[in-house]
């Protein structure tokens, strides 16, 4: 027990350090981005491309920092009684906007009997958004993203399904590893963050995927532990 307490203390110290370091890095990066943007606007045509790449890479570094911060903070979550559906509904406009840009259709199939659960709404949004964005990133135009819920006496299940490229079996085991990514501008922190959010809510997350057909991430929450 003693060593477990030591481990938790060390972890929370690392988390606090990570939080302050990332804050300190974000500020100068914002200044750099501002000036690079200005330089881009005043640059010659032939140099615009360089500035575009600089800004894109700055944004990538920024998203690594943001994702890492969310992961490292491992917040003591404040849960409140809320409906998963309200959370999905609040996210919907963001999802439509993302999907529209990519020519993807979004379908919501929400169970009629959703009970109230003890959840942290902000973290739930982060979870759903991360899974939905991964789904969209796995699809070409005309893909379909489906978000559905089912309620059983013991559990609430949330499914995020896409008709995308699918995940080869040998990659499935690595999905939740920090920094594991197959994307040129990915961070590999989205799914580790999802896993930690789900675990902090006492839930489970699993994946079903068929190459060339699509992927479903399935999150389950226990109604009784949770309510
Ligand atoms: P990132 O999105 O930055 O790459 P994630 O942790 O969110 O990091 O995802 C890790 C990897 O898992 C992705 O790079 C991709 O290879 C795979 N992946 C996640 N979700 C899906 C999905 N819906 N369809 C296909 N591959 C996926
Ligand atoms: Mg991702």
Image (tube, rainbow, N blue to C red):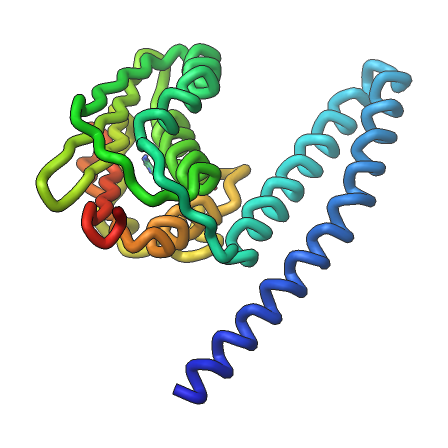
**Residue nearer the viewer, 140 or 220:** 220
- Seen in the picture, residue 167 relative to 178 is either above or below; the reply is above
Q: Residue at the spot x=81%, y=25% of the render?
A: 37
x then y, percent, for residue 65: 63, 48
Q: Residue at the spot x=32%, y=13% of the render?
A: 105
**Ligand 1 quadrant assignment:** top left
Q: Residue at the spot x=49%, y=57% of the render?
A: 76
x then y, percent, for residue 32: 83, 37
**Residue nearer the viewer, 25 or 35:** 25
- Seen in the picture, residue 180 relative to 137 is either above or below; the reply is below
In the shown orientation, is residue 89 left or right of residue 10? left
Residue 59's quadrant in the figure?
top right
In which quadrant of the rendered image does the N terminus lie? Answer: bottom left
- Report the number of numbered marks: 0
Is any part of residue 211 visible from this angle?
Answer: yes
Residue 119's quadrant in the figure?
top left
x then y, percent, for residue 169: 21, 48
x then y, percent, for residue 4: 42, 82
In the shown orientation, is residue 200 left or right of residue 117? right
Q: Furthest-bottom residue in view?
A: 2
């Amino acid at each position: 027990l003693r060593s477990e307490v030591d481990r938790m203390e060390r972890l929370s110290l690392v988390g606090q350090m990570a939080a302050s370091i990332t804050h300190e890095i974000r500020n100068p990066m914002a200044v750099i981005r501002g000036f690079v943007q200005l330089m881009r606007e005043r640059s010659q045509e032939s140099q615009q491309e360089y500035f575009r790449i600089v800004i894109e890479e700055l944004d990538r570094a920024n998203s690594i920092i943001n994702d890492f911060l969310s992961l490292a903070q491992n917040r003591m979550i404040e849960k409140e009684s809320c409906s998963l559906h309200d959370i999905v509904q609040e996210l919907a406009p963001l999802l439509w906007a993302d999907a529209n840009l990519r020519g993807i259709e979004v379908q919501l199939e929400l169970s009629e009997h959703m009970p109230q659960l003890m959840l942290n709404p902000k973290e739930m949004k982060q979870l759903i958004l991360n899974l939905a964005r991964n789904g969209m990133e796995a699809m070409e135009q005309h893909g379909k993203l489906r978000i559905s819920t089912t309620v059983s006496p013991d559990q609430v299940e949330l499914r995020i399904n896409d008709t995308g490229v699918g995940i080869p079996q040998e990659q499935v085991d690595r999905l939740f590893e920090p920094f594991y990514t197959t994307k040129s501008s990915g961070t590999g922190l989205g799914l580790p963050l999802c896993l930690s959010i789900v675990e902090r809510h006492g839930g489970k997350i699993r994946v079903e995927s068929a190459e060339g057909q699509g992927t479903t991430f399935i999150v389950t929450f226990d109604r009784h532990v949770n309510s």
